[in-house]
Image (cartoon, helix red, strand yellow):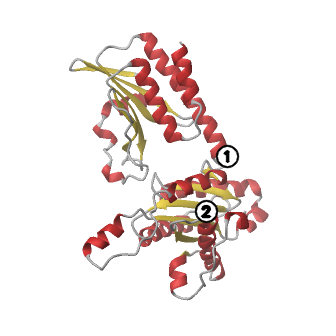
Amino acid sequence: MSQVVDHLAELTGFRDRDVMDVTLVMALRDLLEPESVAIYRSVGEPGQERWLTRAHLRAGDAVASADPLWAKPEALPLVTEHPLRLEAMRSRSVTQVAQGGQWFYLFPIATDRDVVGVIEILSTRRLGASSQRMVSSVLRIYHNFQGLLDYSERDTLTGLLNRKTFDESFLKVLTEIPAKQPLPEHGAEDRRHEAAVPHYVLGVIDIDHFKSVNDRFGHLIGDEVLLLLSRLMRGSFRFHDLLYRFGGEEFVVLMRCDEDVHAGEAFERLRLNTERYVFPQVGRITVSIGFTEVRAGDAPAAAFERADKAVYHAKAHGRNQVHNYAALVASGVIQETAPLSDVELF
């Protein structure tokens, strides 16, 4: 019993979801001694969902493996390739199957709104009822703690990430961006190396004339517009793009992409989806969007300021536009300025 309590204390001692998932599989491996324990989550658009491995630990592994958060969807297996996992999610109950002298146990992972994945345990021996109850109990604590994290990390209206989680995510991104080094002489090999460097983009989205929506229709309708826009954002970006509501009518996206042009296409997709959507009672609304590449050594405030300048340019030149900060500087439309520090902006 004390071993279970120790693992629960460790599980709830972190505020990082990646660390929590690794801690969970380590706890179940120590408690049950199976061949392997893994967490799989269903991600992607309806009809094209895929399995993302959050943490996978075999009996002899010292460190859990996982798919990178920014994994390309096409590199992940389709959910239909593992029907047992799907069955556990759909039934919302434990699924157990004996195959070749081994037992597969699948426990659904649920949020307050939906079932999002499974814990998969592979064992050479059958788990008794008490062991299964223990796993279910640990998962209930895991679920409750994830709910507390959602409450502290997510905007209560839209369900998007909130402002206070942004800096931590931004600093994680910076660790993946190497300091710029002088490139050797040209050549295909050099270009391939440059393409392999992680490329991140920060975008700022602002609803045009949102104050008039609140003034004409009231704040309840204004809140509905914010909620519906957050849904359009989820449908316009990929499952691993980080979406934030910063407050009021301002939203932020942090995404990894190969080139600025791909980011521009994603933001243009959101702009068009918003322009074409008929918001109940309000009708049509538009958004102005600016984005910038995240640079090595950037401060969150500096990157935000650059994207925000592109937004202001869009608003000053007709609104309902998407602008790339780098392109505006290159064309001489706006001037590059010394970056603000976090202290200066906030």
Give the camera-side residue of 234 and 131: 131
Q: Which residue is mark 2?
A: 300
The residue at 56%/56% (across/down) is 171
Tag 1 or tag 2, which sits nearer the N-term?
1
Query: For the residue carrying disc 2, how many other residues have a C-alpha within 10 Å: few (<14), some (14-19), or many (20+)?
Result: many
In the image, taking residue 279 as reference, residue 103 lies left or right, namely: left
> Is residue 285 among what the camera can see?
no
User: Looking at numbered disc 1 in the image, what kind of residue is underneath it?
Assistant: Thr
Q: Which residue is mark 1?
A: 156
* Mark 2 vs mark 1, CA separation in Å: 23 Å
Decide: marks 2, 1 in contact (CB < 8 A)? no
User: Looking at numbered disc 2 in the image, what kind of residue is underneath it?
Assistant: Pro
The residue at 33%/76% (across/down) is 184
Give the camera-side residue of 320 and 338: 338
Give the camera-side residue of 168 and 81: 168
Residue 128 spot, x, y in % from top left: 39, 11
Residue 287 falls in which quadrant of the image? Answer: bottom right
Secondary structure type for disc 2:
helix
> Is residue 271 among what the camera can see?
yes
Residue 261 to residue 77: above or below: below
